[in-house]
Image (cartoon, rainbow, N blue to C red):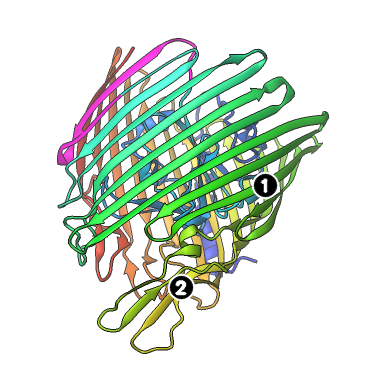
Amino acid sequence: MFRLSGYQIIRVSGLFFCSILLASACLAQYPVFYGEEVVVTALRIPRLRSSVPWNTRVITRQEIENSSAKKLGDIIRTVPGLSVKANGGLSSQISTRLRGSNSQQVLVLLNGHRINSPSLGLFDLGDILLTDVEKIEVVKGPLSPAYGADAVGGVINVITRAESESPQLKAVMAYGESNTRHYSVSGSGQHYFFSLASLRSNGFRANSDYQAEDYNVRLTGGLGTARVEAGLKRYKAEKGSPGSLDFSTPQARQTDDNDFYDLLYALDELGLKMTLSQAVLDQRYENPTWGQLSTHRTVSTSYDLQQVISWFPSQTWLLGLEMRSDQSESTNSGTHDLENKAVFLQDEIEASSGLKLVLGGREDISSVYGGHFSPRLGCVWRPWLDTIVRASWGSSFKAPTIDDLFWTRTTEPGWPSGIVTTEGNPALLPETSDSLDLSLEKRLDFATTARLSLFKSRINDMIRWSNTSTSTRDSYWTPRNISDAAIEGIEFELSRQINDSLKGFVNLTYELAKDEATGNFLDYAPQNQYNAGLTYDDRTGLTSDIKVKYVGERFADQANTIKLEAYSEVDLTMTKKFGSLIVKGEIENLFDAAYAESYGFTDIYPMPGRRYNIGVSIEL
């Protein structure tokens, strides 16, 4: 059962039903056409979103272009159940929580291939620019049965742009606050897509400058009856790392150098697909003030084979095999090679008209922590054409990171006195989780849709770095499986096409994420979040978009002694087309809110204030 107070249940239910009544009172007087979204992430094969048991949010190319977002971590901020944490402006690291799970428990994919760092366990969401992104699929819930380790809270799949039927070419130039410059060129044709992008800024505080280049080339073609695709994406950034207000690092610099490759061979008529992919992540951090230098290089190579079989009209099987090799060279944890082999099976059953069941499971075998089986079960029921009921249960796991396992023993002077020793723990077990989800989606009229989701999960054997020393002066820090977490919450979404030109949305998330041993809230997990937005498009080339984001109070430490204040932020964009020329103006943080999403030693990492940007683009 969900442990919510009566008042909280009444409050959330009241908001839900009041929103329905308000929407019903504003019925549109004209028909509106709705297209079905095709998604691939939840089931690993293309399916209509309405037929998928797992809660899936799709961010389209049009939404990206209407927004002021430059990076992946910015565009996903309004997804219900998802919270973002940044250490400042463009140069900062961006991480995310999804339904209470931390950034190491959220798997990030690029065109269906994992890109989380095996050393750190996460992927910096600031390292993906949006120039070449076609859409983003955010799937909430346990997806280890489909993708293996680290998909505890869900998956964020970034799908890049591909070929087009006719040749297209687009150039963009933009300028903004803090001498921020953005240039990009992209083009596509029947068998190719390419893009080149540059984003540079002086930063909003000392040593927060940022300069990055991003390149993407994708080729498609046929080889007999087969479909062949090859892709290369490269990102390189040089960034200042200013630190928090109390522990400023005015000379610290960081370089991120990432390469992603993938090769696809598919026999679509036979339902067979083979892919080879590789993610190379290079990071260098240097702080001359404190004599720090750390380098990290990981190479993850994956081979994936999957076969779709339809023995009966009402049943579809998906069988798969995956082999992955992770190589790591780090000043923190040395040189290591890890291997993982997996088999997965999925069965989609059309049990009756309007009812679909999905059963699946995956067995992962690691060279470090042994085997782990992840099952899942989901169903979609359409009792009426305007109503969708989803229910799902699943088990997932997060693998220990290479740093957790093999951190080289290090001894340093402590503060204010004593000796501090840190060391990895090769005996760590994977974190495990079980999750339940129930959602109702209702089309109130031709223009309005409401969604209500309830979710509950438990995470066992969470890995925490803890002091095991009994000395009053010295400390010995090592990671251990010492924590369990209970997470439950409610999400509500309402979207409406108000008239021919205006559409809007609002979503609310209430979440309780606690450490069961201490009763404390999980760090950086806000209880309340609200988002709203309006988009105006007059069909003559004028588009404006306004989004309001509210993030409630959250604790910045496990002991719940440090609290970050709630904040609201408003972003506004306006776009006007003049034939093939497009002019776009942006105001980020419209009301100049002062806030922080991350905490340092005794003070915050400040976020930037109001920013202005203006740009032009040409489409040919």
Indicate the amino acid at tag 2: Thr
Residue 173, image x, y percentages: 23, 25
Q: Are marks 1 and 2 in contact (CB under 8 Å)?
A: no
Residue 56, image x, y percentages: 56, 42
Q: Which residue is mark 2?
A: 478
Residue 418, image x, y percentages: 30, 84
| Crowding at mark 1 (Cα within 10 Å: few <14, some 14-19, many 20+) | many
Residue 27, image x, y percentages: 51, 34
Indicate the amino acid at tag 1: Ala
Residue at position x 59%, y 28% from top? 36
Q: In the image, is residue 475 part of the stretch drawn in magenta?
A: no
Q: Which residue is mark 1?
A: 342
Look at the picture and state if 141 lies above or below 231: below
The quarter of the picture where the N terminus appears is bottom right
Frontmost residue, 165 versus 294: 294
Look at the picture and state if 243 lies above or below 182: below
Report helix, strand or loop for mark 2: strand
Label ID, residue 393: none
Q: Main secondary structure of the magenta part?
A: strand
Frontmost residue, 420 versus 392: 420
The quarter of the picture where the C terminus appears is top left
Q: Is residue 180 left or right of residue 465?
A: left
Frontmost residue, 375 versus 474: 474
Report helix, strand or loop for mark 1: strand
